[in-house]
Image (spheres, helix red, strand yellow):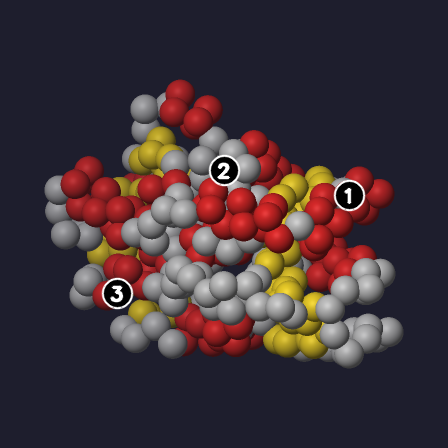
Amino acid sequence: MRCLAIAEESVSRGIPTFLVGQVIDMPWLTQRILKIPSLNWILKQTAFTPNAKTDYLLLDSYELSISDPFIAPSRWRRIVTLVDEVTPKYAADIMIHPGIDASWAKDQNIYFGRNFVPIRKGITKHTNQESSNLRIIVVGGGANPRNVVGFVARELQKYDLDFSVLLFIHRLTAMKDLDSRFTVRANGEELDVEARNADLVITTASTTSLEFLARETAIGIVSVTKNQESYYESLSKQGLVCPLGKVVENYSKFNHSSLHKLLYSYEYRMRLRSNTKGFIDLRGASRIVDLIFEKFNKFPILNC
């Protein structure tokens, strides 16, 4: 998702841009990629041969081996990596941490902070007032790890409140035993449409949470993987989101009292929205592409 936002910006400037890699079992993401005009999508690394004199690599991966021949520095003019705590130590000319943890300032080759959070062009600020019937979106990030959407849905059903809940999952399947307040949707373009009117969003501490933060929506977040813990801690500490628990091992650490407060307190939701005002200005992807221009002082071919 981070790389896709940067690719959108690169393409919009007329820069020849290639997305190299496969998308597995996430049809909504495939649709988003295909809708970016002039983006060259290459499924296999072997089908792309970089030019070491002209081509720049923007690498965002957790699984690629640091010794993979495709990312060898000798094959590229420059390498830029998107990194967090669990990113392998890839060779890079500069690193970008799209988060707000100040400890990243220790390395002079790292650019970090909210100004470098890449946000897709379809994201808009949320300006609507709350409805009398609380409108809630639950989305588990890109792949819904550990079925966080199903878990949150079952917790919400315990409340006798007048709300409507849209459950977004990466592959549309029936969710049994939910009452009429709940509707299941496949992740994709409809999420962006419905997000404009959502009063409350519950999601994972992932790139998706930053997108809703940029929208200036009231948000509750759950951390379900190790690489989400940094966002969870940072966003919670600054009062930008409601922390619902780090449940990497099991859901016994889910914070039920925080969910109760999030659902019952209009004032709390308004405070969360107020705290997000202007925090992310939607220009992170533009700054990253600008940084490549300024740092290397040459018009690049940007390969994601």
Measured along the vertical axis of the image, is residue 276 above or below residue 28? Answer: above
| Spatial CA span between label 1 and label 2 | 30 Å
Badge 3 or badge 1: first in the primary sequence: 3
Badge 1 or badge 2: first in the primary sequence: 2
Measured along the vertical axis of the image, is residue 40 above or below residue 253? Answer: below
Mark 1 lies on a secondary structure that is: helix
| Residue at 29% from the left image edge and 46% from the top image edge | 288
Mark 3 lies on a secondary structure that is: helix
Badge 2 or badge 3: first in the primary sequence: 3
Look at mark 1 in the image and give the residue it sits on: 257
Q: Nearer the viewer, mark 3 or mark 1?
A: 1
Q: Are marks 1 and 2 in contact (CB under 8 Å)?
A: no
Measured along the vertical axis of the image, is residue 94 above or below residue 219? Answer: above
Q: Quadrant of residue 144?
A: bottom right
| Spatial CA span between label 2 and label 3 | 25 Å
Q: Residue flagged by tag 1: what amino acid is it?
A: Ser
Question: Where is residue 221 shown, x and y percent of the image?
Answer: 63, 48
Measured along the vertical axis of the image, is residue 49 above or below residue 27? Answer: above
Q: Residues within 10 Å of mark 3 (few under 14, many from 20)?
A: some
Q: Residues within 10 Å of mark 2 (few under 14, many from 20)?
A: many
Q: Which mark is residue 84?
A: 2
Q: Residue flagged by tag 3: what amino acid is it?
A: Val
Q: Residue furthest top?
A: 106
| Spatial CA span between label 3 and label 1 | 45 Å
Query: Would residue 296 appear left or right of 267 to someone viewing this image?
Result: left
Look at mark 3 in the image and give the residue it sits on: 11
293 or 138: nearer the viewer: 138
Q: Residue flagged by tag 2: what amino acid is it?
A: Asp
Q: Quadrant of residue 14?
A: bottom left
Question: Where is residue 186 shown, x and y percent of the image?
Answer: 62, 75
Q: Residues within 10 Å of mark 1 (few under 14, many from 20)?
A: few
Q: Quadrant of the C terminus?
A: bottom left
